[in-house]
Image (cartoon, rainbow, N blue to C red):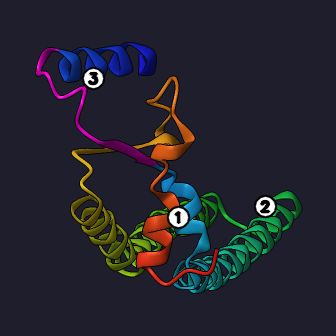
Amino acid sequence: MNRLFSVFIFSIVMMTGVSAQKMGYINSQEIIASLPEVKQANSDIDVMKAMFQKKGEEMVKSLQMKYQDFQKKQASGELAPIEADKQAALLKEEEAKIGEFEQSSQQKIYEKSEELLKPIQDKVNQAIKDVAKENGFLYIFDVAGGLLLYTDPSADATKLVKTKLGIAQ
């Protein structure tokens, strides 16, 4: 699929007669990995994940203890059938709450990631646009996406974007 897309892009470029125009490429993964803001954002997200994971583990452990207690009472005949049904239903409700907590946690982590990483991505995109304009690039491709089959190292604009962002080489 990527190969087909690359051939398609190349064909369009050739058909429009812009083959003489200046094209460049970047490695967005390299650029983003170099940004200290990304490292801090990832650290904040990891802390949040750890907090949710700990809380989820506590909830599961509590449910397991309640379930074991229920099984002991049921095996020893301490529970009447109606009471056993009530407790089983409560355990099922608690299990469902754990599932809801996990889904909610994943959603909150996703939202936090978006909140922290979107401004960084916007900053990188703006730097790419600025570098393209300043250096006369008509197109800048991203090799991190695997769309290019061959690139001339002289067309690599990654360093220019990193410089624009103030990242040490």
> In the image, is residue 24 part of the stretch drawn in magenta?
yes
Out of 115 and 72, give the one closest to the viewer: 115
Q: Is any atom of residue 86 visible in this view?
A: no
Of tags 3 and 1, the one toward the viewer is 1
> Which label number is shown at residue 159?
1
> In the image, is residue 63 part of the stretch drawn in magenta?
no
> What residue do we see at 41% from left, 74% from top?
117
List the single residue furthest toward the left.
16
Q: Position of residue 78 (x, y in %)?
A: 79, 70
Q: Vertical placement of 138 versus 123: above or below?
A: above
Pointer 3 or 1: first along the chain:
3
* Residue to which mark 3 is pinned: 9
Label 3 – label 1 distance at C-alpha: 24 Å
Q: Vertical placement of 51 versus 56: above or below?
A: below
Circle 2: residue type: Gln
Of tags 2 and 1, the one toward the viewer is 1
Name which quarter of the figure residue 161 lies in.
bottom left
Read off the magenta span.
15-25
Circle 3: residue type: Ile
